[in-house]
Amino acid sequence: MQLRKVANVVGSLQVFVALFMVTAAGVSALYGEAAVGGILTAAGITFVAGAGVYLFTTFEGDVTTRESFAIVTLAWATTAVAGALPYLLTGSLDSPVAAVFEAMSGFTTTGATVFTDIEALPYGILFWRSLTHWLGGMGIIVLVIAVLPYLGVGGMQLFQAEVPGLTPERLRPRITQTAKLLWLVYVGLTAAQTLLYVGGGMTWFDAVNHSFATLATGGFSTKNASLAAFESPYIHWVTIGFMYLAGVNFALHFRAAMGRPLYWGDQEWRFFTFVLLAAAVVMAGLNLAAGTHDALEPAVRDALFQSVSIITTTGFISADYELWVPGAQMTLFALFFVGGMTGSTGGGIKAARVLLLLKHTLNEIRKNLHPKAVLVARIGSKPVKEDVLAHLIGFVVLYLLLCLAGALAMGFMGMDPLTAIGASIATVGNVGPGFGNVGATEHYGWMSDSALAVLSFLMLVGRLEIYTVLVLFHRETWKARRSYH
Amino acid sequence: MRVLIVGAGEVGFHLAQRLSQENQDVVLIESDPDRAAFAQQQLDILTVVGNGASMSVLEEAGVRDARVIMAVTSRDEVNLIACLTAKKLGIEYTVARISNPEYYDRSSVLSREQMGIDLMVNPERECAWETYQLLQSAAATDVAHFAEGRLQLIGLKVLEGAPVAGRTLAELGVQLKDRHYLTAAIVREGVTEVPGPNSTIEVGDQVYMIAPTDEVQDIPLMAGHPRFALRRVMIAGGSAEGLYLAQVLEQHGIDCTILDRDRRRCVEMAEQLPKSLVLHADATDLELLEMEGVSGIDGYVAATGNDETNLLSSLLAKSIGARKVVTLIDKFEYLSLVPRVGIDASVSPRISTVNAILRYVRRGRVITVASLASIDAEAIEFKVEDDDFIVGRPLREVGFPEGGVIGAILRGDEIIIPRGDDMIMPGDDVIAFALPEAIGAVEKLFS
């Protein structure tokens, strides 16, 4: 592990972060706000620090596996700290921990906020929040890979550490080309959604911000009431559509744009779509039966909105689901454990993992009937190797343990069980809203600094799909022993 | 006629043997000197040591005088290049043994013509296909097919209470005149007879009948066998033949279980067989066979790649009540054992490949020849030309030689099972059935 290599990449990344802060300052200046000074100062500090580290370190050769884990984890942590500066320097937040939480929530596309009154914030700060989502959604490393060829072969290592997924899908032979194509799809969808919003009567500012938050499956809104603030069914339907698109594998979108729509042939897509539609039907039915809704369209729209929002881990809210009947609430709770498709911007366990785990479990049941059977789990017609399956089971166990540990920690800090569980699964899964005191209409602003620090960590671990971060806590990572790869 | 054979493995050796017995000049090319020497000793052929894909070796083997090259090494690429080279050197007919389906596939960008190959044979696939046919017609001990599978020849035993037992063929002809079938041979006490109208069918006979494939299922009923539907099959052994068979069964929606003792092979098969159940087990593990429901199973195929294991495994399966047991056997000495120990049928991967090759290339205008493992007679498919002796006369007037019979006439899409007043026209394909001593006389009719 060569720390100067790690520092070099992380430093160069901060230069980019600073550049994006300048655009937020630009927005602030456009609206003539006082906040522009604070944001520019934050950009200056980030730029000087990042460029300084970059100039005083060197990057030679390739990135080793261990270094890639360190680079990605440290890059995200540092970016969250840098991203907190605008909140502090404009006086929007006083506590540094709360500011890092907000930035981490932004970059990890969680969408949990500590702000109590969002609408009182300067436009520059609102834009910065949405921008952190948008940058984090596709992955800040992927962005760097797309524009910085110098990472070379190491780029693939970094790419995999940041976007682990199950089957790293290469759209093009070169990783930089793949990263560029993914960004192209991302930018295209963002632009489309913005235009549709504006066409539906949203202001340009709101449209851009909500598009950023939707495509990244983030969840920050410019309104206190989230999407419920817009009473237009059209806006809600557009949001449902784009949240859904953001939760689908971007490689599928790219292929469709190339004239080869392969959605139906993809079993993960069928599973993801089926689960979300089934959940929506159940919730709409229960809500109609219980009288929470009295008309069909709003019932279906609200059920679909909430289920898409949770399963894709976006976290937008169009109705307070905590007022729903327990059956509908528990259905939504179950969706916290599914997540988006692999290759999407969504978080969570990911649909492919859930599907494979179910298939593997079925195989284990069948094995009782045929003790000598050799059974292979497959996604579509593709068989999945046993070591991939073992890795996956490890992942799911760690994921659930992490949720449990988070809930325990929240409990020890005095939260009620529902809130503790809600906060934990909503941050590990990068969803945002949870249950109880962090429910649909609540926020995280009342929490102590220590609780926010723990939850920030959970968001980071969840976003980088656990292994990448936890590897750094294994002592062998830091020993100069044996493998350099 | 000179025939070049590349590769003296199981298939090549056996091909050389068969062709040299038929008085063809065989030159066998083999890279391993020991194998070449062995073949030279055993067979009346010429051997050349060297790489069959090399031009100089082909020249040395006399490629310019040869009519046919059969490249049957176990390596696809060697076979392809050998054929390609021989074709460029002016050989008329090329046969390549190809295992990789990608080369085989019609969707391949390299067409057979481009590769200079007239026939591709996949031994494992031929064998699996033949086994499948045997499983489907439960009563059959032999199955051969003609005309792209539209016509079948099946051999089976006549059981007690069979409707056909004790009748002459003339009587049966009157009684079953709506049915399209023809009795091509009767084996009684080890003697093969090509029957005339006055021959009778008796209980215990082994009879060979030709019928269109879609009517073939009635024949077992006529011979006194119960109706049978193939629903569940177990394949013991994950050899290439076993895997192909499992794939064929999956395609036909038949419930298939396949086992192998090598775990890695099991994983490989499980990945390729989405619908079958793959077991990591031994083919002779009686307890497991019972547990997995072999008693009462419709079909059991032993395909481990080892003759002895196959025989033992088949015996175990039969003893606990598998209905139709097929064994894959390569050693000729064992073939005669199969009916004696009560195993229903056997397939020889070697013979099925050799048949597949000979079917296409033997003797001038002969299209297909099927040699059946257990009897002497051969089925031969001729293409009829204008000036053939037999053309344009009712068959009853032709005076067909003793020991020979015309089994079927293929005219375009039509299949005719001939009777006395049918005539043969130019352009027909004719399938004749003949004892070895009558083959010459039959061939004369088509000249």
Image (tube, rainbow, N blue to C red):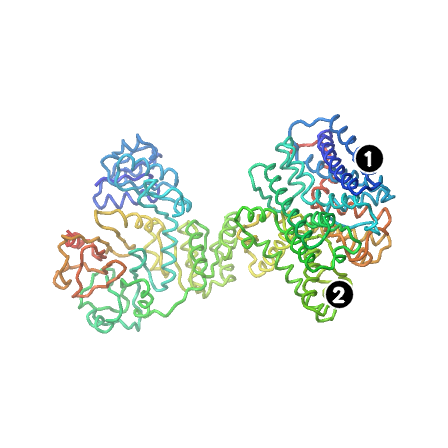
Mark 1 closeness class: few <14, some 14–19, many ≥20 residues within 10 Å: some
- Secondary structure of the residue carrying numbered label 2: loop
Residue on which the image places disc 1 = A41
Q: Does residue B21 appear left or right of residue B293 in this picture?
A: left
In the image, residue A483 lies at what x, y percent? 65, 33
Taking A47 as reference, is A327 above or below it? below
In the image, residue B251 lies at what x, y percent? 44, 57
Which of label 2 and label 1 is nearer to you?
1
* Image label count: 2
Answer with the quarter of the image where residue A122 lies. Answer: top right
Determine the residue positioned at 24% across, 59% down: B411
Task: For mark 2, name the chain.
Answer: A
Which comes before the other along the chain, label 2 or label 1? 1
Q: CA distance from mark 2 to mark 1?
A: 46 Å
Answer with the quarter of the image where residue A94 lies. Answer: top right
Q: Image quadrant for the N terminus of chain B?
A: top left
Q: Is residue A150 visible?
A: yes
Camera-nearest residue between B241 and A162: A162
Determine the residue positioned at 25% across, 45% down: B19
Label annotation for residue A52: none
Task: For mark 1, name the chain.
Answer: A
- Secondary structure of the residue carrying numbered label 1: helix
Camera-nearest residue between B37 and A254: A254
Taking B96 as reference, is A334 above or below it? below
Name the amino acid, label 2.
Trp
Residue on which the image places disc 2 = A324
Q: Does residue B143 appear left or right of residue A475 in this picture?
A: left
Camera-nearest residue between B331 and A271: A271
| Same subunit, tags 2 and 1 | yes
In the image, residue A246 lies at what x, y percent? 65, 50
Answer with the quarter of the image where residue A183 lies. Answer: top right
Q: Does residue A453 appear left or right of residue A353 in this picture?
A: right
